[in-house]
Image (spheres, grey):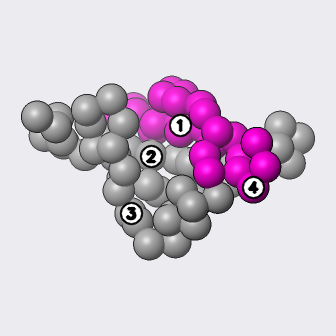
Amino acid sequence: MTGGMIVQLIEKQPDGTLVQRDERAWSQDMIAALHHINYLTLGGREYETIEGRLNVEKQTMELLIVAVRGSELK
């Protein structure tokens, strides 16, 4: 994908364990939007973005997210 990157969304559970929720190619526009957002939606749920990490070995961006309580979208 030219101008994009593979992004992994990793959810931190209340007990501290990590669960990968999504992995897909994001466009450069979606990556740029991260400068302006704190929350994202995935699978009908809302998540807060906590931090990001660039994995040089895998050439991916990893975003740590936590579920927002009562965030099931209708």
The mark nearer the N terminus, 2 or 3, is 3
The mark nearer the N terminus, 4 or 3, is 4
Per the image, the residue denoted by label 2 is 65
What residue type is disc 2 on?
Ile
- Given residues 64 and 25, the one toward you in this image is 25
* Mark in the foreground, 2 or 3: 3
Mark 1 vs 2: CB contact within 8 A: yes
From the viewer's perspective, tell me whether residue 72 is left or right of residue 34.
Answer: left
The mark nearer the N terminus, 1 or 2, is 1
What residue type is disc 3 on?
Asn
Numbered mark located on residue 10 in the image: 1
Mark 2: few/some/many CA within 10 Å (<14, 14-19, 20+): many
Residue plotted at (28% across, 44% down): 46
Per the image, the residue denoted by label 4 is 3
Per the image, the residue denoted by label 3 is 38
Report whether residue 43 is seen.
yes
What residue span does the magenta drawing correspond to? 1-27
Q: What element carries label 3?
A: loop
What residue type is disc 4 on?
Gly
Q: Using the image, determine if residue 39 lies above or below residue 70.
A: below
The mark nearer the N terminus, 1 or 4, is 4
Residue plotted at (36% across, 36% down): 42
* Mark in the foreground, 4 or 3: 4
